[in-house]
Image (cartoon, grey):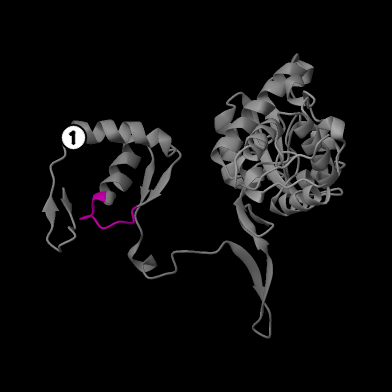
Amino acid sequence: MFTSGSSGEPKGCVIEHRSYCTSAMANGPVIGLDRESRSLQFSSYSFAGAVVEMLMTLMHGGCVCVVAEEDRGTRFYKTGDLGVKASDESTEILGRRDTQVKLRGQRIEIGEIEHQARQAAPDIINVAVEMTELQGKGPGLIGFFVPRARPDMGATDAQTRTTIQTIRTRLEKVLPHYMVPSALIPIPSLPLKASGKVDRRRLREMGSALSAQQPTELPVAEELLRQPKTTDERRLRDLWAQVLKIEADAIGVHDSFFRLGGNSIAVMKLVAAARRAGTTIAVADVFQNPVLEAQARALTSVCKTPGREGLQSQAS
């Protein structure tokens, strides 16, 4: 196999068949290659990447798509937007062909969230995420999933809570906070159109029907609702309730500020509310420690660190 070489001179490197096969068999499942995969043969045959595109795909039973000669030179990247050309040559944007959405300036691939949720809990039948208007809280993401063991089939609240927590733990680990749904809702089945595709409009209607408080009232583990014990935890809990407009009793020490509906704007409101209450909290502290208990611990240790602004608790 020859590489292009930074000097302009091709450099040959020897790769044993068994070494490549071991690598291909291990990496294929990681990037999701299977019998349903379709891979574009894009790289030059003289480039090492072409071997990956062709051989790795074929080894896992996928299909390698070779561009026809007449298709060469056409636009490779399409934005995915749908539009209508008007008589005055202007374009009216109708929406998108895919599930990409924009939330508070951030572009979000809904498919990526759904994929990660499926990876987290193989025991769920299906999952769909939609951006919807949450009453009293503005736009947000809601996740709907169909558990394999439904309540009418003997599933318990404990099983549902475990599934929700498993999904959420993975999403918070692999995705940025703005891509983690505010709520994960178990439903018997996803609404479908006559074509058999998921009726996402119906999902948005279901999400919008939830009150601002309902997402935080969905089944969660009892330990997540453990009430604050320290002064700092109680002070933070009350500030969160004020900014997020939810009941203070619904906030536990293991809750995440972002899971309860917080975002970058809410973080700034929290900082301002803390300042008005006579307490100083840095924006970075909220992002680095979104969980109430960890945030209180970190902020308490910050107070003891000279020269650093953090949470400065008033004498209670």
Q: Which residue is drawn at 63% across and 39% down?
A: 302
Which of the two residues, 297 or 106, is positioned nearer the viewer here?
297
Numbered disc total:
1
Q: Is residue 147 visible?
A: no
Q: Can residue 167 be seen in this view?
A: yes
Q: Look at the image and say whether residue 91 sits in the magenta stretch.
A: no
The quadrant in which the C terminus is found is: top right
Q: Look at the image and say whether residue 45 sits in the magenta stretch.
A: yes
Quick one: label 1, few (<14), some, or many (20+) residues within 10 Å? Answer: few
Q: What residue type is labelled 1?
A: His
**Residue named by callout 1:** 17
Which of the two residues, 154 or 13, is positioned nearer the viewer here?
13
User: In x, y percent, where is residue 119?
Assistant: 55, 32
User: In x, y percent, where is residue 226?
Assistant: 77, 23
Q: Residue at x 69, y 41 (%)?
A: 181
State whether residue 111 is above or below residue 217: below
Q: Would residue 214 appear left or right of 60 to someone viewing this image?
A: right
Q: Which residue lies furthest to the bottom in this view?
A: 88
Q: Residue at x 68, y 69 (%)?
A: 93
Give the extent of the magenta segment: 41-48
Q: Residue at x 60, y 37 (%)?
A: 172
